[in-house]
Image (cartoon, rainbow, N blue to C red):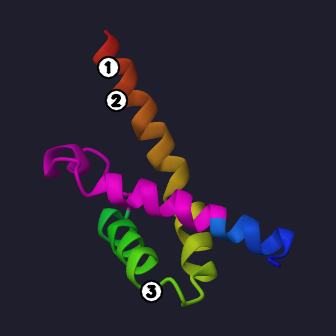
Amino acid sequence: MISTEGLRLLAAERSFEIVCNALRLLPNGTKARQAEIDWKGMVHLGRRLRRDYHRDNTDALLTIAQKNLPPLKAFAERVIRESQS
């Protein structure tokens, strides 16, 4: 049986995989508007999560969460606001 911590890690990995895969579809012009986000690193993490499911990705997940998710969230919120104007 998987521990609660193990389930949380699996859920986090799957969530990151979904987000990182979606980022591949963003046009380069959109990505250029928010240059401080490590777009390539996030896409690479998505590939690792898809292909190397047996590897420990905890450090990569923490790095992406700390460095890229806050500006990604702010960017997404700004784009949504602009599209509604």
The residues bearing labels 3 and 2 have C-alpha atoms spaced at a distance of 32 Å
Q: Quadrant of the N terminus?
A: bottom right
Place residue 20 in its image quadrant: bottom left
Quick one: label 3 or label 2, which is nearer the N terminus? 3
Do the CB atoms of the residues marked 1 and 3 lie less than 8 Å apart? Answer: no
Magenta stretch encompasses residue 19: yes
The residues bearing labels 2 and 1 have C-alpha atoms spaced at a distance of 5 Å
Q: Which residue is mark 2?
A: 79
Which residue is rendered at x = 22% and y = 51% of the image?
Answer: 25
Nearest-to-viewer mark from 1 and 3: 3
Q: Which residues are magenta?
A: 11-37
Residue 22: percent from left, percent from top: 33, 52
Residue 4: percent from left, percent from top: 85, 68
Q: Main secondary structure of the magenta part?
A: helix
Do the CB atoms of the residues marked 2 and 1 lie less than 8 Å apart? Answer: yes
Residue 81, placed above or below residue 21 = above
Which secondary structure lies at badge 2? helix
Q: Local crowd at mark 1 within 10 Å, few (<14), some, or many (≥20)?
A: few
61 or 66, which is in the foreground?
61
Nearest-to-viewer mark from 3 and 2: 3
Residue type beneath disc 3? Asp
Q: Which residue is mark 3?
A: 52
Q: Is residue 60 left or right of residue 1?
A: left
Residue type beneath disc 1? Glu
Q: Which residue is mark 1?
A: 82
Q: Quadrant of the C terminus?
A: top left
Q: Residue furthest top?
A: 85
The residues bearing labels 1 and 3 have C-alpha atoms spaced at a distance of 37 Å
Which secondary structure lies at badge 3? loop
Q: Is residue 66 left or right of residue 38?
A: right
Which residue is rendered at x = 41% and y = 39% of the image?
Answer: 75
Residue 7: percent from left, percent from top: 74, 68
